[in-house]
Image (cartoon, helix red, strand yellow):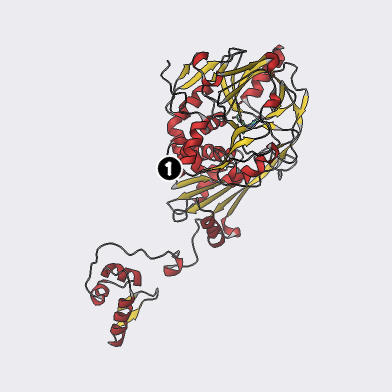
């Protein structure tokens, strides 16, 4: 009726797309909920469980746990330029469309009031020292009761009872501010969690730009209108095409109970702290609901969805900051194994830009280590960057540090004053060698049309490296050229330059 495709951004549809490109491990055998996280972390692909827990849940994990899968979410194969695609979509706001309950797939099944039983959902223990089983794939959709501003975020949910959960509202966030204002007014904060969402919705939930309407951010990143229905118990917005929705409210009693510890996205545990209780008033879902979990803390952080969401957002920020400084980078990469937040690699065209890039990027909060490389290094390839660190970096010359910098609150190396030291690695410095010794080694590329008939003709033009000789003569072999060079040597007309080029006397 609304003309909006309610299947296009459905999680199940996205999983089908991932299957088609070989990005999903499907587990048909029964899997205990306690084993889910280890299986997900054990694979570089997404994991689809057809028979999870005693209820035989169908459940998927790590759908956004790689750059390739995020590229698929954007509908592109260009994995390297996702920040540009993100920027393009953010600049093209999309509308919100209201969908009646009868048309909202997420409200096909309704469980409300006393029938609510959270223990029938696949909360699972995700990390060895978590405080309880969690549901990690929840996106909160809230409307500020005071201002009407619409807010979206991602929040973990800890199972507390059959109809209550705990969430973590300790870090600075819009939702925390809204909740504190409600508590001050003596009001509950009503809102709804979507569980089972497209990776672009998660990315939108993590955008922290000061926008008036974060529901529009979800629509914009989708590049399509966002269909919203009204919650069955509170009339508040829910994404009509989600897999499942949990409706309810954060208790006006405020911060009353211990939540956590929980395995955090830097790879250490966040501590147990006092948080609010969330009361569930209804659960709605699709008839063929696909449950979702996200991998959050892990040894292999690059397999978590958060690492890639953060990386795209950090890269967008870096491009903004460099643009303002008049620097046009060749490539920008926020390294996922450093949570997409702490390490950035930038490659530049012009020599000598290393220090300028480092100075500019030190201004980005929490970005701790900046690596600047020449354009010839592929900054997306760890082995090339390791090579560059070994061959292009001299600590006394190329290391830039800045002390007293704001540390990310979960950084386990931060000082008592909550600061850290940033480091810039300038790998663009001058080399102590020149000529052939300053050249990086590459396999030969011999192509193009021949320009000379004989070795002698070619070398009459100029001295040449052996590969240039081959290209000039159109030879894809080279052995015959070595023999011809021997003939010229015998005639006494051949010599070598200091760099080993072949030349005529
Ligand atoms: C999987 C996942 C779980 C998250 N859990 C929490 C959480 O429990 N508490 C929190 O404050 N932030 C959490 N975050 C980060 C917030 O979602 C993020 O900072 C968001 O931008 C906050 O939105 P808001 O400021 O609009 O409320 C989580 C992010 C992800 C991707």
Res 465 seen here? no
Q: Position of residue 183 (x, y in %)?
A: 71, 16
Q: Position of residue 232 (x, y in %)?
A: 59, 13
Q: Quadrant of ligand 1?
A: top right
| Residue at the spot 36% in from the left edge and 76% down from the top edge | 497
Q: Residue furthest right?
A: 257
| Residue at the spot 66% in from the left edge and 28% down from the top edge | 172
Q: Position of residue 463 (x, y in %)?
A: 31, 73
| Residue at the spot 43% in from the left edge and 64% down from the top edge | 442
Q: Residue furthest left?
A: 453
- Please name the residue that numbered disc 1 is placed on: 77
Name the quarter where the C terminus is drawn. bottom left
Determine the image quadrant of residue 225. top left
Vertical order, 476 against 45 (above or below): below
Q: Position of residue 430 (x, y in %)?
A: 49, 60
Count how many numbered circles sit on residues in the image. Answer: 1
Dot 1, crowdedness within 10 Å: few (<14), some or many (≥20)? some
Q: Is residue 256 left or right of residue 364?
A: right
Determine the image quadrant of residue 167. top right
Q: Is mark 1 within 8 Å of ligand 1?
A: no
Task: Looking at the picture, tell me which residue is in the foreground, 125 or 31.
Answer: 31
Res 375 seen here? yes
Determine the image quadrant of residue 498. bottom left
Query: Secondary structure beneath disc 1?
Result: loop
| Residue at the spot 42% in from the left edge and 27% down from the top edge | 92
């Amino acid at each position: 009726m609304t003309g909006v495709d309610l299947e296009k951004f459905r999680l199940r549809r996205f999983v089908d797309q991932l299957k088609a490109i070989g990005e999903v491990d499907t587990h048909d055998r029964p899997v205990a909920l306690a084993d889910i996280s280890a299986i997900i972390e054990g694979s570089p692909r997404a994991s689809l469980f057809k028979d999870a827990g005693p209820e035989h849940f169908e459940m998927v994990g790590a759908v956004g746990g790689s750059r390739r899968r995020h590229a698929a979410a954007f509908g592109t194969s260009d994995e390297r330029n996702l920040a540009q695609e993100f920027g393009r979509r953010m600049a093209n706001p999309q509308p919100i469309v209201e969908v009646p309950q009868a048309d909202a797939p997420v409200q096909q099944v309704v469980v409300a009031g006393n029938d609510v039983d959270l223990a029938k959902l696949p909360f699972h223990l995700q990390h060895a020292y978590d405080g309880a089983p969690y549901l990690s794939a929840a996106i909160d959709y809230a409307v500020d009761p005071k201002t009407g501003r619409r807010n979206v975020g991602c929040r973990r949910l800890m199972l507390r009872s059959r109809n209550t959960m705990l969430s973590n509202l300790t870090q600075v966030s819009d939702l925390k501010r809204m909740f504190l204002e409600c508590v001050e007014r003596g009001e509950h904060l009503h809102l709804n969690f979507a569980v089972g969402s497209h990776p672009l919705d998660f990315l939108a939930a993590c955008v922290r730009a000061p926008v008036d309407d974060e529901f529009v951010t979800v629509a914009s990143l989708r590049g399509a209108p966002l269909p919203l229905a009204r919650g069955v118990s509170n009339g508040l917005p829910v994404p009509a095409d989600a897999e499942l929705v949990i409706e309810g409210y954060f208790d006006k009693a405020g911060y009353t109970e211990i939540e956590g510890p929980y395995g955090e996205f830097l790879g250490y545990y966040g501590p147990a702290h006092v948080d609010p209780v969330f009361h569930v008033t209804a659960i709605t879902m699709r008839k063929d609901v696909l449950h979702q979990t996200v991998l959050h803390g892990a040894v292999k952080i690059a397999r978590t969805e958060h690492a890639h969401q953060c990386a795209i957002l950090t890269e967008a920020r870096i491009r903004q900051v460099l643009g303002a400084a008049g620097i046009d980078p060749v490539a920008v990469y926020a390294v996922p194994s450093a949570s997409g937040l702490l390490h950035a690699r930038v490659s530049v065209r012009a020599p000598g830009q290393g220090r300028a890039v480092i100075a500019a990027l030190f201004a980005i909060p929490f970005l701790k280590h900046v690596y600047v490389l020449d354009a010839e290094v592929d900054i997306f390839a760890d082995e090339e960057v390791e090579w560059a660190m070994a061959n292009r970096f001299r600590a006394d010359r190329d290391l830039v540090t800045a002390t007293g910098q704001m540390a990310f609150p979960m950084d386990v190396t931060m000082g008592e004053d909550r600061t850290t030291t940033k480091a810039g690695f300038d790998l663009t410095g001058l080399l102590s060698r020149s000529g052939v010794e300053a050249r990086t080694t590459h396999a030969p590329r011999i192509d193009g049309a021949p320009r000379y008939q004989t070795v002698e003709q070619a070398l009459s033009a100029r001295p040449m490296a052996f590969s240039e000789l081959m290209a000039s003569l159109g030879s894809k072999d080279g052995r015959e050229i070595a023999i011809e060079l021997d003939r010229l040597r015998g005639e006494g007309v051949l010599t070598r330059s200091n760099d080993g080029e072949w030349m005529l006397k």
